[in-house]
Amino acid sequence: MRRISLVFGVIFGLTMATGPGPADAQSAMREDVFDLQTALHYFQFMSGPVDGEIGADTERGLRRLGSYLRLGPISPEAMETTPLPLPLRSLMDAYVGRNDIDTTLLDERDLGRLNREGDRFWIRKELQPDPSTWGVDVDAAADTCSAYSNEGLIGTVIDPDELPEIEGPASVRVIYFGPVTADFRPDRLNIFVDPWNMVTKLTCN
């Protein structure tokens, strides 16, 4: 009896030491996909089954989400990465926080957006930079791209395809969110915009 208990103890110890196996990891991943599908379904990007499997309906939902966020198609593989890419994090944050919404904190502009976009508005709201971070993010002594000359752009809405008159810089680029090319050009003005094309920040590089 003692020998049996000893053998059982060794086996149990080895099992605990090895941790969760491939089946557990696959189950956790399936649950994550299920949660993302639930959010896609809630915001009406997806109409197919919520089943934890990444199929054609899920891929269509990701394309619609990417189109809504003006990002283009979102890869299905993005649902299996850790941490989740920013668009999917904003989707989940908006879904998880859907019962804690306080519309009294919205200004008139955001209330208008909410009326036009419905609950999807909150996905974009998750991506909007905190107003306390808005402004010119350049040392005045190192302003090589005329950022301060264009400070009046902060808080205005622009058309990224038809920029207003910009003073001074050799080149200009508009940055929404996501990856930015790493090339360094100190005479280039970067115009950061929120999900509704409102200018939130100016930098040089």
Image (spheres, rainbow, N blue to C red):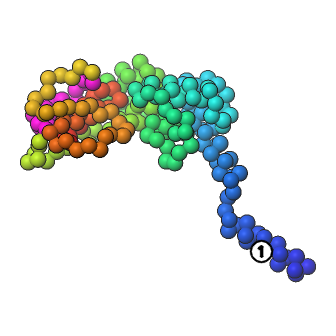
Q: Main secondary structure of the magenta part?
A: loop
The one nearer the camera, 116 or 12, is: 12
> Which residue in the protein does label 1 denote?
10
Q: Position of residue 33 (x, y in %)?
A: 61, 39
Residue 16 in the image: above or below residue 33: below
Residue at x-position 14% and y-position 23%: 165
The one nearer the camera, 5 or 23, is: 23
Residue at x-position 17% and y-position 32%: 171
Say if residue 152 shows up in the picture. Answer: yes
Q: Is residue 157 magenta?
A: yes
Span shown in magenta: 145-160
Q: Position of residue 75 (x, y in %)?
A: 51, 34
| Left or right of residue 43: residue 112 | left
State the quadrant of the C terminus. Answer: top left
| Left or right of residue 139: residue 23 | right
Q: Position of residue 161 (x, y in %)?
A: 27, 21
Structural crowding at the residue carrying mark 1, measured as other residues with C-alpha within 10 Å and reported as few (<14), some (14–19) or many (≥20): few
Element under label 1?
Answer: helix
Farthest residue toward the front? 183
Residue type at mark 1? Val
Say if residue 100 shows up in the picture. Answer: no
Residue at x-position 62% and y-position 27%: 56
Residue at x-position 30% and y-position 26%: 197
